[in-house]
Amino acid sequence: MQTILDKIVESRRKTLLNEEADCKRGKNVLPFSEAILERKFIFEIKRKSPGAGFIKDIEPVKQALIYQKNGCAAISVLTEPEFFGGSLEDLKKVSQAVSVPVLCKDFIVSEKQIENAYKCGADAILLIASVLSENELKDLSDYAKNLGLEILFEIHSFKEFEKVKPLNPSVVGVNSRDLKTMKININRCGEILSKLPPGFVKIAESGIKNREDVIKLEKAGANGFLIGTSVVKAENPEKFIRELIYG
């Protein structure tokens, strides 16, 4: 039986055949991991997800400028079209409008996606350990590094960390959401974070709803926090961000 993750990856491989970036990079690559260590919070541009359904029909640039104005470290832009309502056009517009690093968040399975992300202004890309083999992780990370991009390696278990460890990661994200069931478990995220060795930036992803969640995950070892649904759903995103950062 296909999981949601299987369906997303299968769909992504099909849509890639017709996807070509209408972009030409016009800026230098910005340091992603340094920004996280300085300002901690990555806020996301997304309209829907398999777990939350339709969230909000946001205007990407307007939302991104709110994030930047309120002190984000970086902005994550979903580019997966079918399940998350994202696009390379969103990535291009946001990267042109802001001065903070931009993460291309997608289910990346090919060099073409990385090249498109680079052309459209991404400073970092996401590689998901559960989607890729060890050889694919190495080949795709090498390709991204050759373009000057940083990589956020996403894991859902300590066993998956063993897949990315040989690649000397600069940033590792622990996702509280199980991509096969879409269920969230922040406590499990904290357990995995606490087991990770030093030497790289650690990001807690998904399910963060308030300052208490931030404090809990920071105590477990998180250096940064990637927050999507909660900030997009917020009626007053500026107030929500201030409460997340300052309580």
Image: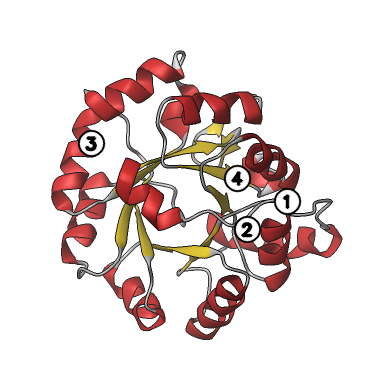
Helix or strand or loop: what does disc 2 sit on? helix
- Residue found 39% across the figure and 56% down from its top: 33
* Distance (Cα) linking label 4 and label 1: 20 Å
Badge 3 local density, few (<14 within 10 Å), some, or many (20+)?
Answer: some
Q: Which mark is residue 26?
A: 1
Helix or strand or loop: what does disc 4 sit on? strand
Which residue is labeled 3 in the image? 213
Give how far across and how far down residue 150 sits, in percent. Answer: 50, 64
- Residue found 57% across the figure and 68% down from its top: 148
Badge 2 local density, few (<14 within 10 Å), some, or many (20+)?
Answer: few
Give how far across and how far down residue 44 sits, in percent. Answer: 50, 38
Q: Amino acid at mark 1?
A: Gly
* Distance (Cα) linking label 2 and label 1: 34 Å
* Distance (Cα) linking label 2 and label 4: 17 Å
Q: Upstream in the sequence, badge 2 or badge 3? A: 2
Q: Upstream in the sequence, badge 2 or badge 4? A: 2
Q: Amino acid at mark 3?
A: Asp
**Vertical position of residue 153 compared to residue 218: above or below:** below
- Residue found 77% across the figure and 62% down from its top: 16
State which mark lies toward you, 2 or 3: 3
Of residues 147 and 152, the one nearer the viewer is: 147
Q: Upstream in the sequence, badge 4 or badge 1? A: 1
Residues at discs 2 and 4 in contact (Cβ within 8 Å): no
Residue 50 found in image quarter: top right
The C terminus, quarter of image: top left
